[in-house]
Structure formats: structure tokens, C-alpha cells
Amino acid sequence: MLQKHNEMKKREFLKVLGIGTIGTIAFATGIWSCNGSGRKPGHKTLAWVHPNQPPDADKTIDEWKLLLGNLKRWGVDSILLLTGNKSILDQVLPLAKEADLELHAWIITMEWPDEITMKEHPSWYVVNAKGESCIDKPAYINEYRWLCPSNPEVIEFTKKRVSELCVYSELAGIHLDYIRYPDVVLAAYHRAKYDIPQDDLVHPQFDYCYCGICRNQFKQISGLDPLTITDQATNEAWRDFRHNSITKLVDEIYDQVHKNGKMLSAAVFPTPALAKMRVRQDWVNWKLDYVMPMMYHKYESKPVEWIETATREGVEALAGKFPLYSGLHLYQLTPEEFGLAASLSAKAGASGLALFTGNNMSEAYCRFLGKKI
Ligand SMILES: [Zn+2]
């Protein structure tokens, strides 16, 4: 009966896909599913989890147990728990263990609109090519107050944040989000959403960071002051300096996290090229245990099928350096499209999926992963 049901699902799926053969598609064989016999060794499903979704609704213990139990049942191996303060780890770590789920602390890294830090350490914050600090003139939205990755005090501050989390012995790892510069250019979707007239060129008010430390460090390398060069937007050495600045920070965090016996992962922009161009993330060259590019096709005005292309670009660029898990935005996908996106990710060589968010996962989505429910 169950087999018949699965066969039916398989046919429905193929209809959605518009193809007649199952040979190349990793659907309904359990590739992503929990305990599925077809699942490849090392393949994982992770889920980003908000502690208070819907907003301002702190979960009770029973609500946590229900969510974590469901995620486990739906084939999730690990949760990436948004960790604003440590108390959430005190609450959820024991429950995750009980549910047999690995837990990673998901942190917002460089975007740090904290009033006290801005007041006490204004020099920690990025400055644009017009010489304006993001404290005075944040780009795009008020929360866009970002720390400068070149500043040694910022590096120490960030490592301290991470080390305070690493004391939790049950914690599996640290997951870095917003590990980047502010957007040099926004995707078309966000330009429309925030009504920001912008093209694909680099504009000085969105071009960071020209703080004293960045200028001095670059001068030492090149003899040039980035604030006065005429080719700020295209100067390769200046562009590379900023790629390297984020890369060095990630690498330092990696060493520290590993010293504590934990893993390091990161949420990044969807393809290596887009990540470098938009937010100066050269994530292919970072030290990581695995990476979750956010394959959010609607932000890119692309069809679901683009997820396969984007996944393949990342997998090929990494060339086996570390695993890539395709980040899928559940709010942008119907259950049918989710099944398609998962299958195309597998086809393109992803080692797993990362669900945004686990809070939005459901039986309906799960059915399209081929999981028996
Ligand atoms: Zn700087």
C-alpha cells in the first residue's frame, strides 16, 4: 500500500517536472529523508530556527518539544538556532539533545546595530567612500550599522562572542550569518522592496570600508590611499583587500572554534560570483566545515530551476574543499517546488539542504522529500 502510495507520488512529481524518467532525479528514493535507505553517506538536512517566530512569541518547553520532534521526524539532522543571547542555549540545548538533533549557534556577525557599542566604539564601524560612518548615515535601512572586519578590536570582539558560546559542551558548532560587508549593490527584489533606485554599478555611498584602519592597512600593502584613488570601484587590489579582510576574520574564527572541538559553517550569498560582487564574500576560499549558500531564487528574479545552476557553480568552485548545503527559502517555495528544488540541488552535487526556516517546515513540504509520514 505504502509502496503504491510512493509510486503515485513519484509519478505526480515527474508530472510536475515534465520528465519521464527517474534515472537522473534523486526524488522519492529517500536521498534527503531521515533514515532513508537511499540516502548517501554524509548527506544532511539542517534547519535555521528562530526562537521567537512568530515575532515576540517565546516558545514554551512543550512548543519546543513539538517543533524539535517534528523536525527530527521530517528528516532534519541539525538545527541552526538564532542565538541572540546565551539564555536560549540554556533552554534549547537539552531539548535538542533529547530530540537527537545537533545544535549550532547561529549568530549575526558583522551587522551590529547596538547602541552601546556604537557609543563606546564608533571607530569599529564601517565608513563609506564618501567618508561617512554607517553610524551617522546607515545604508538602506536603520539597522545597517556594520562592524569593520579589518579592525583588530572588532576581530577580538567577534572571537570573544564566539568563545563565550563555545563553552557549551553540547554545542556542535557556530554558524556565521551576515559575515560580510554591507551590500555594495542590492538584488532587484530588495531595490523594489525598499524603493532604492540603484543599478549594478558601485556607488560611493554603498562602498565600504574606508575607515582609518582600512586605509592604513591598504597603504602599507599598495602605497595607495583608497579614499583618493580614482578607480575605487574597479581597482583589483583594493577589491581583493576587502575580500581578504573577511576571509581572514573567518579563518581566525575557524581556528578558534576548532580549538574548542566545534564546527564552523556560514550562510552566504548564492553563488561565488554574486557573493564577491554584492557583499565581498570570497567564501570558496574560507576555512569552513560546510557552507550554506542562500539559494533564494525570488530575490534573484529567477525560476526554481536556477537553484540547480547556482548549486553547481558553488560545488564546482569548491572542488570538494568542504560540503555545500543548498539553502532553500520555504516561504518562496510551494511544497511541489520545494521537492523540485531539493532534487535539483542533489543533482547539482549538494551534500545536503538547509531549510529557511525550520519553523515553517511542515508535513506538506516533507511529503515532497519522499519521507514516509
Ligand atoms: Zn574599515
Image (tube, rainbow, N blue to C red):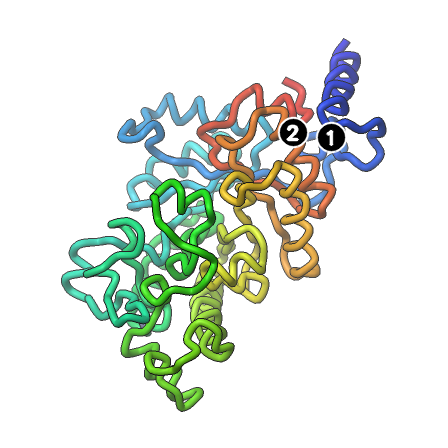
Identify the residue shown where x is 25% and y is 61%: 134
- The answer to which image quadrant residue 93 occupies is top left
View extreme (top): residue: 1
In terms of sequence position, does the residue under pointer 1 or pointer 2 come before the other?
A: 1
Quadrant of the picture in which ligand 1 is shown: bottom left
Q: Quadrant of the N terminus?
A: top right
Residue 106 in the image, given as x and y percentages of width and height: 41, 47
View extreme (bottom): residue: 223
**Pointers 1 and 2 in contact (CB under 8 A)?**
yes
Residue 127 in the image, given as x and y percentages of width and height: 28, 68
Q: Please, is residue 342 above or below residue 363 in the view?
A: below
The amino acid type found where label 1 is placed reads Phe
Residue 177 in the image, given as x and y percentages of width and height: 42, 51
Q: Please, is residue 195 above or below residue 201 in the view?
A: above
Q: Please, is residue 82 above or below residue 34 in the view?
A: below
Residue 50 in the image, given as x and y percentages of width and height: 39, 36
- Gap between marks 1 and 2 measured at Cα: 8 Å
Q: Please, is residue 67 above or below residue 1 in the view?
A: below
The amino acid type found where label 2 is placed reads Gly
State the residue position of label 2. Answer: 339
State the residue position of label 1. Answer: 27
Q: Nearer the viewer, residue 189 or 304?
A: 189
Describe the element under mark 2 as helix, strand or loop.
helix
Circle 2: is it few (<14), some (14-19), or many (20+) Cα within 10 Å? many
Q: Quadrant of the C terminus?
A: top right
Circle 1: is it few (<14), some (14-19), or many (20+) Cα within 10 Å? many
